[in-house]
Image (tube, helix red, strand yellow):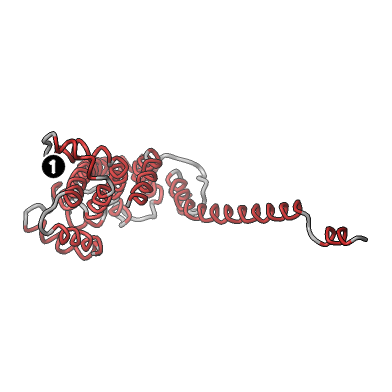
């Protein structure tokens, strides 16, 4: 046997190495996807249980609450939601408060973010630092001060109490300020030469360029306001002013009497989840794109 023959037989061929590397990559990919699918099922399963129990009868839900298949399926839980609770009132209040707060936050947060980004005035850095500090304060710390302020101003137990304290948030101002910082100041020169004021440059020049950040802020504000529960505890006490989260909490606490009432409670929770899920699915691509653009530019 020649030396060349011995060396060829003792070392693996390029084809064998390629096949071995491909097998390892395939095994690694399979393992990664298996882990992702497992955790996805872990997070999705409670939502599946919620949907299944919404369509179950009361005895079936009490006997097998973790079963993902109703035996039999029924719409009685949803019928009781609208006929036996104040769900229409809660839904109307949530729609009103969410729309007003979302529109107000997008406009006011953008306005404040533009002022902190473009205008030069004394105390600007200190004001921005205060906004950052507010973001670090736990919301529960502000419950009693909120109640005292609303009570002293005569706004307690009113729509104004539900809307005004959450009309502007520090996180939204921070997001818009950071995005405006990424836009070159030179884009406003032409408008400034034409005699445009600060608001005109904000509204006509800079704000249209901030569409990714606006979409991100809109989705965050809508979701946060729709699901807002702690603020309603200190803002209103009248059942006619309850929003969906407050009304659902009232149901869970047993306001309709004894029994588990899983179909009723989970059916109401499912109806409250649908608007947020629809909004996120519709704007998912723009939301992710806006978040990525903001991180890249920031």
Which residue is disc 1 drawn over?
198
Q: Nearer the viewer, residue 64 or 298?
A: 298
Q: How busy is the neighbourhood of tag 1: few (under 14 within 10 Å), some, or many (20 plus)?
A: some
Residue placed at 23% from the left, 42% from the top? 186
SS class of the residue under badge 1?
A: helix
Q: Nearer the viewer, residue 192 or 2?
A: 2
Asked if residue 7 can be seen in this view, the reply is yes
Instruction: State which quadrant residue 207 falls in.
Output: top left
Q: Residue furthest left?
A: 153
How many labels sit on residues? 1
Residue placed at 78% from the left, 58% from the top? 12
Measuring from the top left, give residue 175's x and y in whole percent: 27, 51
Asked if residue 167 can be seen in this view, the reply is no
Residue placed at 25% from the left, 57% from the top? 230
Measuring from the top left, give residue 227's x and y in whole percent: 30, 50
Quadrant occupied by the N terminus: bottom right
Measuring from the top left, give residue 63's x and y in whole percent: 49, 54
Q: Nearer the viewer, residue 179 or 214?
A: 179
For this view, does 154 lie left or right of residue 10?
Answer: left
């Amino acid at each position: 046997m020649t030396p060349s023959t011995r060396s060829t037989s003792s070392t693996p061929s390029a084809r064998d190495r390629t096949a071995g590397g491909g097998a390892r990559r395939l095994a690694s990919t399979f393992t990664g996807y298996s882990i992702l699918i497992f955790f996805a099922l872990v997070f999705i399963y409670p939502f599946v249980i919620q949907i299944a129990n919404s369509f179950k009868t009361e005895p079936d839900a009490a006997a097998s609450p973790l079963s993902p298949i109703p035996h039999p399926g029924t719409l009685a839980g949803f019928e009781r939601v609208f006929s036996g609770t104040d769900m229409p009132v809660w839904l109307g209040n949530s729609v009103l408060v969410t729309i007003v707060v979302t529109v107000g936050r997008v406009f006011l947060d953008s306005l404040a973010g533009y002022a902190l980004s473009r205008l030069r005035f004394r105390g600007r850095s200190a004001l921005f630092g205060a906004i950052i500090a507010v973001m670090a304060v736990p919301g529960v710390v502000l419950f009693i001060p909120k109640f005292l302020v609303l009570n002293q101003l005569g706004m307690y137990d009113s729509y104004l109490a539900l809307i005004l304290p959450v009309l502007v948030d520090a996180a939204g101002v921070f997001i818009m300020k950071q995005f405006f910082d990424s836009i070159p100041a030179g884009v406003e020169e032409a408008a400034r030469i034409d005699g445009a004021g600060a608001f005109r440059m904000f509204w006509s020049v800079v704000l249209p360029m901030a569409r990714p950040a606006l979409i991100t802020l809109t989705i965050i504000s809508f979701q946060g306001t729709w699901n807002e529960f702690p603020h309603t505890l200190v803002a209103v006490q009248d059942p006619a002013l309850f929003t969906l989260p407050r009304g659902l909490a009232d149901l869970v606490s047993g306001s309709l009497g004894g029994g588990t009432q899983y179909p009723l409670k989970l059916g109401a929770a499912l109806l409250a989840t649908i608007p947020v899920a629809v909004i996120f699915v519709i704007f998912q691509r723009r939301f992710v794109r806006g978040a990525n653009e903001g991180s890249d530019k920031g």
